[in-house]
Image (cartoon, rainbow, N blue to C red):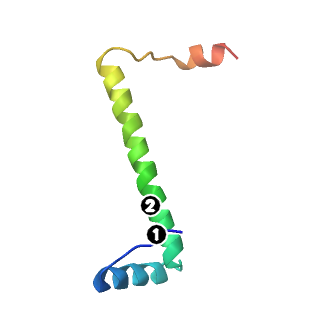
Amino acid sequence: MISLRLNQDDERIIREYARFNNLSVSEFLRQAALERIEAEYDLAVIREYEERKASGNVKYYSHEEVWGDV
């Protein structure tokens, strides 16, 4: 279980948003947290790719090369 302290304005906004989207507050906060984690992970993967690309450590394959091994 996780407990969260909010001021009244933040709590009202979150409750209204959740209700508007037919979610419980718990469902909304869970989804929001997991989406944030996923977005940061995706960004980390993109940054890693960009670093590898900049250093010349990315190999590209043509469509024929990919399907030729099947």
Distance CA(mark 2)–CA(mark 1): 6 Å
Badge 1, how many Cα within 10 Å: few under 14, some, many 20+? some
Q: Which mark is residue 29?
A: 1
**Between 34 and 20, which is closer to the camera in this rendering?**
34
Q: Which residue is denoted by mark 2 in the rendering?
A: 33
Residue 16 is drawn in which quadrant? bottom left
> Going 41% across and 49% down the picture, which residue do you hit?
39
State whether residue 59 is above or below residue 5. above
Query: How many neighbours does mark 2 have within 10 angstroms: few (below 14), some (14-19), or many (20 or more)?
Result: few
**In the image, is residue 44 above or below residue 60?**
below
Residue 51, labelled with which disc? none
Tell me the amino acid under the disc marked 2: Ala
Label 1 element class: helix
Q: Position of residue 17 (x, y in %)?
A: 41, 79
User: From the viewer's perspective, is 20 left or right of 46?
Assistant: right
Q: Position of residue 47 (x, y in %)?
A: 34, 33
Q: Nearer the viewer, residue 12 or 2?
A: 2
Q: In the drawing, does residue 46 fall left or right of residue 70?
A: left
What residue appears at the point 36 percent right and 76 percent down from the top-left corner? 5
Front residue of this view, candidates 8 and 69? 8
Assess whether mark 1 and mark 2 are in contact (beta carbons under 8 angstroms): yes
Q: Identify the residue shown where x is 31% and y is 86%.
A: 8
Could you tell me which quadrant the C terminus lies in?
top right
Quadrant housing the N terminus: bottom right
Residue drawn at x 48%, y 57% as measured from the top left: 34
Q: Check disc 1 and give the amino acid type.
A: Leu
Q: Pinpoint residue 35: horizontal percent, then vertical percent.
A: 45, 57
Viewed as shown, does residue 39 lie left or right of 63?
left
